[in-house]
Image (cartoon, coloured by chain):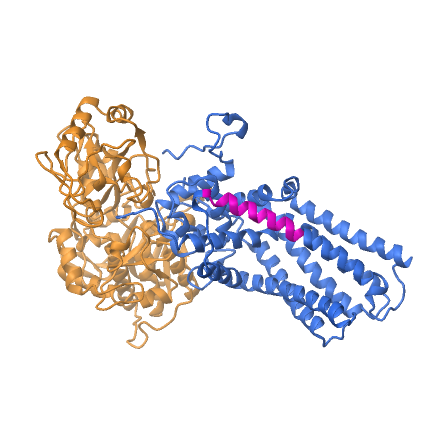
Amino acid sequence: MQLREPIAVDAGAQGEAYPLIPVLSVAEAEVDRQMHICNACRYCEGFCAVFPAMTRRLEFAKADIHYLANLCHNCGACLHACQYAAPHEFAVNVPQAMAKVRVDTYADYAWPAALGALYRRNGLTMALASAAGLALFLLLTLLVSGTLLPGRLAGDFYTIFPHNTLALMFGGAFGFAVLALGIGVRRFWKGITPAEAEAIATGAATLEATGAVLKLKYLDGGHGQGCNNESDRFTLWRRRFHHLTFYGFMLCFAATCVATLYHYLLGAAAPYPVLSLPVLLGIAGGIGLVIGPAGLLVLNHRRDPAHGDVAQRPMDRGFIALLLAISLTGFALLIGRDTGAMAILLAVHLGVVMAFFLTMPYGKFAHGVFRSAALLKYSIEKRQPDRLKLGSE
Amino acid sequence: MIDVLVVGGGNAALCAALMAREAGASVLLLEASPREWRGGNSQHTRNLRCMHDAPQDVLVDAYPEEEYWQDLLRVTGGITNERLARIAIRASSTCRGWMRRHGVHFQPPLSGALHVARTNAFFMGGGKALVNAYYRSAEALGVQVRYDTPVESIEMAGGRFVAARVPAREVNGRALPAERIEARSCVLAAGGFESNREWLREAWGQNERGEWPADNFLIRGTRFNQGVLLRSLLETGADVIGDPTQAHMVAIDARAPLYDGGICTRIDCVSLGVVVNREGRRFYDEGEDFWPKRYAIWGRLVAQQPGQVAYSIIDQKAIGRFMPPVFPGTTANSLAELARKLELPEAAFVETVEAYNRACRVGQFDHTSLDDCHTEGVEPAKTHWARPLDTPPFYGYALKPGVTFTYLGLKTDENAAVHFAGKPCANLFVAGEMMAGNVLGKGYTAGVGMSIGTAFGRIAGTRAAAAAGHHISAENEGHDHAVA
């Protein structure tokens, strides 16, 4: 039996002869090998966008591999259906091969480039960011109040941290995260779109891609019964928990935005009553952000180890745990805001949120941005004429 | 005692087990393979040929019974049993609701297979997804499933099935003792004998060149179809049908694995170029008809060539016009270089291709229709899609015969009963590849194996349940028992 030779060569050894052909990494060469098997089989075309995108190609350059890797949602359907999965000697495992490349794309397209290295030891990154966030706000509390227990403050956060200070700190961190992710995904987009095929997003393509993102279309298994988790049985729970997480996060974000508007436009300062819009949005979002990440954690622990790249589980779980910490500390603050523990609860919550903002461009959060870009490319590409004309089977 | 014993673990066996269980019988299914290889050749399938009189979900237009029958009559050259063929054809028009209830998902044809959009329904994810769904449903309904449990023979008494015998074996380092498993009735659905190299060798014999052709065959499917039970049945005196050399046989990439190469090892550029044998000579009209209608004859054609090897040769013009092969082709910038790389006699090969090139009468090339590009004055002629091989790089793919499944099997009837001396056995039934030869004397057309397996698997399961005292009432039939 002969398979395609892996063409992974040390970039330095490539020399001057072929300066325009990017050399594949070991992980990319593995995707290349598997895609040639899949392209000759195609049984999985109905599951997701990866396989229809694959069939538009005969060769898989670095750009194609990065694109396909981010198009893959790691749903597991193609692995369980694969006649070439181990113990077959072809050992096809598309979700795993894609996952290994995917994390490399996050790191390689990260901005600033040096911080891409944070993806390599992401569990540690998450832990350090959380510790730093907590330490920062606990120290600030001590510095400002001289004690962590300044007594009952009737929920008035701003006696500890003035509103403008918080707005500046979090606005700055969030602004940087948006900038870094924006530059990263722009580099990714340029990387996966060769100059001669400059993609122009049409309205219909954008609409379709947005729908695929917001509905998590490709976690439905292609038949609506969902993706795989611990076995070949289908489940919709990963999609549901992800929805709770995502929309919970968005509601919490909306709560923050509305509160900021209240503050600057209406001159109404926090704390807001429980039945006010910001708090109601925060509670609704917080509930989602408790149940969603908790469910995802359970599913992650039960996931078939053959799904995706087990080495990335610290990144996945660190991110999910941080989201859970945000919602739990948020609720603790809401419950305890009229007690003497408010200052500590506030510092802990702000510390966790700060850790989240700081790691947004260097952690699992990036998957949403990169995958959305890949889905947009898919929606654009499928509207373009197919260059291949396969007349027979 | 168990009511219904099902021997085998592929599509037909699972259909039988599910139907018998739905009829209320207790069912034990014995799969010879370990769990990770379960499903026999069904794990490599992808479609079901379906009769339909009007568009049905994923099926376009109509494919009436008569047209289906005529297609079958043509590919088998009349070596078929019309009564049984029509049973399979009719069943294919109504079985998909039941399949869906057991978790099978259908989808429109895959890219590169649009020509069968009218005649075939495709399984989403292919045959392994179907097999997984059936096992899930079977387990949810209470069918007992045992893996690593091959049956070597059955025990008969007074013309009735009594028990199946499982030999002593080693599973994951554990020695398991021989077993004798009794049941009130039994369904045999353990596949053909294509994985048994010795039997293939014996069946194909020695040719006029002194070669043993079968030694050069590859097996596209499971390694577990050793035909042990089939041979035992034949020795027990069960009525047999079919020619042991007849099989579903395709020309596949010579580098394919010995077993389980499945669909991806097919080479689909035959009609876009020429095919030469080891001596560098062409031997058959590469453009006789559309490739999907001809791919199933090329396995036998290659089997008849010296060394059971052939070479599909194309040039740059063909790239992107056929399903991409799994292995890269041998490439060269001249025909002579290609001959050297493929280790073909250079002069003879170049002469063959140049003679072909000179003979090409190129009209309007269109590989989606039977176009007017043909050869004149060369033997054998290429009657369509004949264009000179003149645009380097040239590509060559070595081909070998790839056996999908053999047609030698047990003679049966509309009740799927195994026959002894012309008489149906009351409690022993057969389904799938073990009896497909009743319908398929030779030849093949896409998706018909799954039609036969599904139809006769379901019949065998129902009859086996009835033989064990369980009947599916009319109102119960098709009722939604399935959990998938």
Residue B221 in the image, given as x and y percentages of width and height? 31, 45
User: Considering depth in this image, is A220 or B164 the residue closer to the camera?
Assistant: A220
Please count the marks in the image.
0
Q: Colour of chain A?
A: blue
Compared to A334, does B222 lie above or below? above
Q: Left or right? Give the position of A132 relative to B266.
A: right
Q: Residue at x 67, y 60 (%)?
A: A324
Q: Residue at x 65, y 64 (%)?
A: A289
Q: Residue furthest left?
A: B377
- Majority secondary structure of the magenta segment? helix
Q: Which residues are magenta?
A: A177-195
Q: Say which quadrant the N terminus of chain A sits in.
A: top left
User: Considering depth in this image, is B364 or A302 the residue closer to the camera?
Assistant: B364
Compared to A362, does A267 lie above or below? below
Residue B135 in the image, given as x and y percentages of width and height? 40, 58
- In the image, which lettered chain appears orange? B
